[in-house]
Amino acid sequence: MKSIKTFAAVIALSAISFGSFAQSVTATASTLDSAEAKIAAQAEQAGASYRIIEANTNNGVHMTAELIK
């Protein structure tokens, strides 16, 4: 009986941790500021904060960020 309760607790905690994984979003624009503004708008719409993990300035800007809830 104790092992069943332990197993159930592990399953419940696993489900919670899967729900808290960060989501990646991207934006493209002509400047770093405008790309970050697009990322910020996506984060605000999702009700999350963000962390920029990549930005590439090759004939424009491509930016990737993680949304953190």
Image: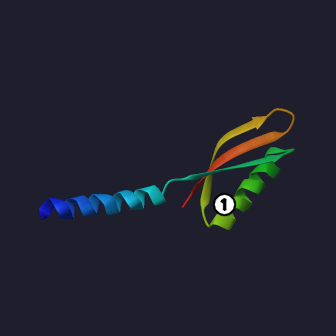
Q: Residue 69: image x %, image y %?
A: 54, 61
> Which residue occupies the foreground of this view, 9 or 29?
9
Indicate how the structure is coloured in the image.
Answer: rainbow
> Which residue occupies the foreground of this view, 59 or 18?
18
**Callout 1 environment at 10 Å: few (<14), some (14 to 19), or many (20+)?**
many
Q: Residue 4: which quarter of the image?
A: bottom left
Q: Quadrant of the N terminus?
A: bottom left
- The number of discs equals 1
52, above or below 56, in the image? below
57, above or below 34, in the image? above
Q: Residue at x 13, y 63 (%)?
A: 2
> Which residue occupies the foreground of this view, 20 or 37?
20
Q: Residue 18: which quarter of the image?
A: bottom left
Task: Specify the farthest residue to the left.
Answer: 1
65, above or below 56, in the image? below
Element at badge 1?
Answer: helix
Q: Residue at x 15, y 59 (%)?
A: 3
On the image, numbered disc 1 is attached to which residue? Answer: 43
Q: Residue 51: image x %, image y %?
A: 61, 50
Relative side of 35 to 24, left or right: right
Q: Residue 47: which quarter of the image?
A: bottom right
Q: Residue 45: image x %, image y %?
A: 69, 66
Kind of residue indicated by mark 1: Ala
Q: Residue 29: image x %, image y %?
A: 84, 47
Q: Residue at x 78, y 49 (%)?
A: 35
Q: Residue at x 80, y 46 (%)?
A: 28
